[in-house]
Structure formats: C-alpha cells, structure tokens
Image (cartoon, grey):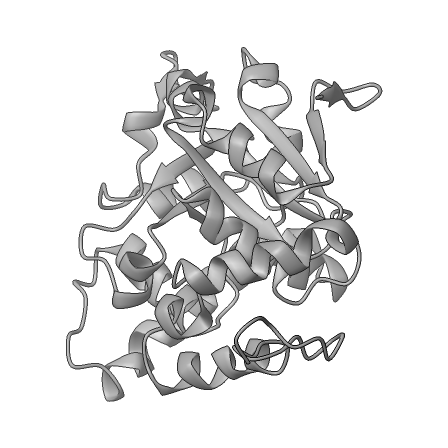
Amino acid sequence: MSRAKKGTSLQVVPVDSWSAFQEIVAGPRFRSWAFRGQGDARWPLYSSISRYLLEHRVDPAAWAEQEERILRIFRRKAHLYLAHVPAETDAFQWLALMQHHGAPTRLLDFTWSPFVAAFFALERATAPAAVWALCLPEIWKAKHKFPGRKALVTEDELGLRIPGNYERFFLGNEVPFVVTGEPLVMNQRLVAQSGTFVVPGVLDRPVEDVLSVYPSPERTVVKFVLDTAKVRDEAMFNFYNMNITNATLFPGLDGMARSLSYELEFHWAYDPKTMMRFPGY
C-alpha cells in the first residue's frame, strides 16, 4: 500500500477510504509517532516563519537577526496581556505562546493523535490532503556535528527546555537537525490537541528533507495522502461523533464559533447535501 517517492526515501501511503486510514494508524507500527494534518498534500513541512521568510523574500543573511527580533518584541510587550509571564530564559515557553497566538515561529504543531491530525487535514480540504507521521524515537537517536565542537551532539542536548539552547543551536541556522517536545508548562490548546512540537534547526529546508538524511529515513517519515473526495464525508461525521471539533480543540469562544462551519453540513434528521431524511424522521 505504501510506496517511496521517486528519488527519495519518503514513504507515501495513498488513502482512499476512512476505514483504511483507521486500520493503519491504529496498528502497532504507529505507536510513539507524532502526526500533522495539512489541507493540501502538495505542501511541504515548513514552519510558519520559514514560509513567511521565503514567500516575502527576506534575505537569508537577515533571518537570524529578524527571528531573534520578533521574539524580543513579543517578550517586551506580551506581559500586557498575560496573567502568567514566562521566565526570561525560557525561550521554548515564549515560542509556544507566540505560536499559540499566531506569530510566525519555527515550531511546527504536531499531535500524538492521528485522528486530530486527520481532522486538521480534512476540515477545510477540497483537494487531496496529507497527514504526516514522524517516528519520534528514530529522531531521538540521531547525533549531529556542530562547527567548533569535537563531539557529536545528541537530541537530548539540543532540547529547547535547556536555557540558552535556542540561541546556541537554532538561531544560527547552521546545522540541519530536528528536535521534538513541549515546554514544561503547557497551554490549554496544547493539552486539548494532545499536542507536541517539531522544531527544525534550519529554516530553508522542509522537515521531511532534513529527515531524509537521518540514519533510517524510511522508518522515520510517512506521508499519508488522503483522497478528500472519497474520505472526507465519513471522516468528518466520525470526528463529530468522537467530539473532535474546533470547539474541543480550541477551547473558548473562538473555537466554538469555528466549530459552527461543520454544522452547515450536518443535521440529525436529514443529509443537507442530498436532502435525504434519516429513518425515524
């Protein structure tokens, strides 16, 4: 069912039924994997700050300074709106807050739930969508060579919870690597989405490209390509019954309001798309 993309080790799994996706991701292989849904299967795994810098043609020579600058601005101003202000040295906490509120960062939102990821992939999709899956234990095994360091650096040593690591290992955009994890203090949305973060060491290459040269890329990255036309209706109904909605994934009034979009497609008494009434109505 899976195939490698020509010229790469990327495994691409076409999915043309919701039951097939459920069967695959519920199996033993995908335990300890993290998932990300994207509404267009053509999109690579770029962070929001990568997309912004590339799309708006910011000179790469300025990337490190500009990335550090927006973090500094956020730190100086966010206290006006926060009940709890993170420690100045907790860059991961600050980046998670920025991500939560829509600022461009190098964090990519992933989830431990393949079904939450599929919801994000399919909710607004009209073309083939994608659920990306990363085997985190394989990522954790990798070691990386940094300029000026004799010893290889492990993922544990690169972790963003360690004070100074963001500035030391990430801002320079020198070494292609990927780390994963969550800040020590998690926000409500991260908890609701069973969320985790994937964080690349460079901004000019998508995550799947960085992982393609890891020791076992064929066991590290899988891309499920969902045939939206065949999968979406059944999947969205299942999400609704599983209580996977914008109202539950984005706690608060905004999430509840966003959840009303699917109510346009759903009714207990009939199918709004075909106008066929259900038994008993």
170, above or below 268, in the image: above
Question: Relative to residue 8, is residue 143 drawn left or right?
Answer: left
Residue 55 sits in quarter: bottom right
Of all residues shown, which one is farthest toward the front? 280
Of all residues shown, which one is farthest toward the right? 6
Given residues 34 and 201, the one toward you in this image is 34
Tell me what residue is drawn at x 23 percent, y 41 percent: 162
Given residues 214 and 129, the one toward you in this image is 129
17, above or below 280, in the image: above
Given residues 76 and 19, the one toward you in this image is 19
Tell me what residue is drawn at x 52 percent, y 65 percent: 104
User: Residue 243, image x and y in percent?
Assistant: 38, 64
Residue 63 sits in quarter: bottom right
Tell me what residue is drawn at x 56 percent, y 40 percent: 202
Question: Relative to residue 21, is residue 67 drawn left or right?
Answer: left
Instruction: Report the number of discs.
Output: 0
Image quadrant where one finds the C terminus: bottom right
281, above or below 155, in the image: below
Question: Can residue 8 be seen in this snapshot?
Answer: yes
191, above or below 173, in the image: below
Image quadrant where one finds the N terminus: top right
Given residues 9 and 270, the one toward you in this image is 270
User: Residue 115, image x and y in percent?
Assistant: 47, 48
Residue 16 sits in quarter: top right
User: Residue 279, image x and y in percent?
Assistant: 57, 71
Question: Can residue 109 be seen in this snapshot?
Answer: no
User: Residue 222, image x and y in percent?
Assistant: 61, 28
